[in-house]
């Protein structure tokens, strides 16, 4: 019974880290698409203008918040879960989640080759858990 509870805690914390990473990365990508070409902004307004354009984006700030929460969730996870399980687990969930989120929320074209790569990562993580 305790072993099952420990596994549940491990996989739940790994999933939380991955979800926060995916949310942060998608939000930051969305914000940067909205802000536009930073080189063009810098040519018009300099570094301050480009920085202001990025920092004034609420979507960017929400993405930064998710990434900060991700960092602390990762610290918690590493205090409870072996590194050899936590990092591949987080990486695979994040890799799969980013592909799905990019397709759904950012309308990116995720081709067959990327889905095959995602599948290979998942198989590798599955082998690590055995």
Image (tube, rainbow, N blue to C red):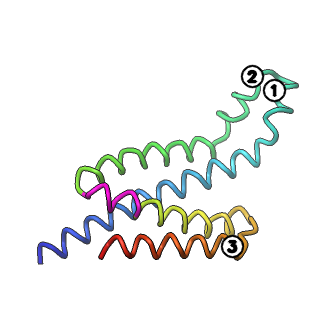
Residue corresponding to mark 3:
113
Residue corresponding to mark 2:
47
How far apart are labels 1 and 3 at the CA level? Answer: 36 Å
Q: Which numbered dot is residue 62?
A: none
Circle 2 packing at 10 Å, graded few (<14), some (14-19), many (20+), is some
Left or right position of 23 against 35:
left
Percent across and percent down for residue 73 are: 35, 50
**Observer-nearest of 7 and 23:** 7
How far apart are labels 2 and 3 at the CA level? Answer: 38 Å
Residue corresponding to mark 1:
42
Residue 83 lies within the magenta run: yes
Name the residue at 34% across, 59% down: 86
Q: Earlier in the sequence, mark 2 or mark 3?
A: 2
User: Given contact means CB atoms under 8 Å apart, are the residues at marks 2 and 1 in contact?
Assistant: yes
Q: Earlier in the sequence, mark 1 or mark 3?
A: 1
Name the residue at 82% across, 39% down: 37
**Over which residues does the magenta segment extend?**
81-88
């Amino acid at each position: 019974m305790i072993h099952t509870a420990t596994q549940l805690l491990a996989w739940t914390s790994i999933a939380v880290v991955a979800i926060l990473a995916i949310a942060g990365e998608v939000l930051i990508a969305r914000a940067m698409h909205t802000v536009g070409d930073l080189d063009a902004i810098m040519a018009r307004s300099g570094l301050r203008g480009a920085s202001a354009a990025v920092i004034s984006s609420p979507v960017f700030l929400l993405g930064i918040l998710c990434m900060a929460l991700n960092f602390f969730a990762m610290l918690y996870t590493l205090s409870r879960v072996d590194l050899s399980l936590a990092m591949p687990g987080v990486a695979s969930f994040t890799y799969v989640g980013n592909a799905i989120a990019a397709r759904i929320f950012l309308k990116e074209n995720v081709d067959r080759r990327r889905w095959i790569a995602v599948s290979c990562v998942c198989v590798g993580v599955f082998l690590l858990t055995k």
